[in-house]
Amino acid sequence: MPHLTASAAARRIAGGEQLGFGVPGYAHPLLAPAEWAELARPGTPLHWAVLNIANGPGSRPDPHCLEAAGRLRNARERALHGEAPDDTVRASGGRLLGHLDLAHGERPFDELIADARSFIDWYRIGGFYLARCPAERAELPAVRRLTGTLHALLAESDSADGGGRLVLGHGTHPYPGYAEAADQLVTFQGPWTDYRWSQVAEWTADYPPERFAHFVHGVPRTHLEEAMRVARWQGAGTIFFTDRNDRDGRSGQSDPFAALPSYWDEIVSRIGPGISE
């Protein structure tokens, strides 16, 4: 079990237990039709999913991605406005986020904003996932400038209800100041062999679970319960666990998060139905 101080552990337990999915980015809808269909299936506890066409929005609107984006957006509308049955099975309420690759701080600001505008204009996304986000203190002012501009763009958009959502894809614990630059931070992305013995940064105990996400690949079915227990104790409210890994040829993808895990139905049932507000 990962190390935690007693005070941090107490705060985790008091912060709530409900988990939901964050999807770092499935393959193109033509290659992963089942994956995209699952996102809008009633009962899927989806917080958000990332749309990534060509390491960004691509050069022009993609009709297959437009269709997938529309289905997810409609499912969210039904969930948030009470059109779905109010029983033990709820429609998914997840946002669609556009993929912006920060390249660890190397991409120009204007280039990122141009990609952001294309995502908003073409796909009416509800936020952004900032992949390969820097984690060092020195890069924080540049990231804050970017997230401030993105929030302003989303506020002007008629598709981003509630002002949109920004997720920083660090994949590790960043300098604490990043917690004030976005809505959520990805503080772990990697294999189960590292995750099961990982340690949480103590400063994260000052924030609720909905501020953190964990992405773990290579999680065996027999260790699902343990993985979920680690996520809860470390204070992550959003997860994506998969038994696939970066050397797995079953999906034809080198990205372990590009396809559904073999135990998708089981992990959905373990988390239970939910809705993202």
Image (cartoon, rainbow, N blue to C red):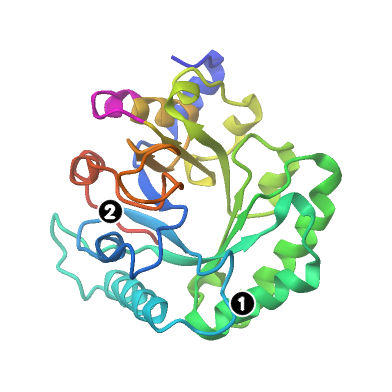
Residue at 19% from the left image edge and 40% from the top image edge? 266
Q: Is residue 274 above or below residue 80?
A: above
Highlighted range, magenta:
219-226
How far across and how far down the image is residue 12, in percent?
A: 47, 29
Q: Are the residues flagged by discs 2 and 1 in contact, CB closer than 8 Å?
A: no
Q: Quadrant of the N terminus?
A: top left
Task: Classify 23 as above or below 75.
Answer: above
Q: Answer whether residue 203 is magenta in the image.
A: no
At horizontal 60% and vertical 33% (from top left) the residue drawn is 204
Q: Residue at x 55, y 22 (%)?
A: 8
Q: Which mark is residue 97?
A: none
Outermost residue on the right side: it is 138
Residue 51, position as x, y percentages in the image: 47, 66
Residue 17: image location, x then y, percent? 35, 36
Q: Residues within 10 Å of mark 1 (few under 14, many from 20)?
A: some
Q: Is residue 268 above or below residue 114?
A: above
Amino acid type of disc 2?
Gly
Q: Quadrant of residue 66?
A: bottom left
Asked if residue 8 lies left or right of residue 223, the reply is right
Q: Which mark is residue 274?
A: 2
- What residue is pinned by disc 1? 155
Secondary structure state at the residue bearing disc 2: loop
Residue 91 image offset from top left, x and y in percent: 23, 65
Circle 2 crowding by C-alpha within 10 Å: few under 14, some 14–19, many from 20: many
Q: Name above or below for residue 116 compared with residue 208.
A: below
Label 2, label 1: how far apart the Cα atoms are: 26 Å
Total numbered circles: 2
Q: Amino acid at mark 1?
A: Ala
Magenta portion: prevailing SS class? helix
- For this rendering, which residue is in front, 115 or 77? 115
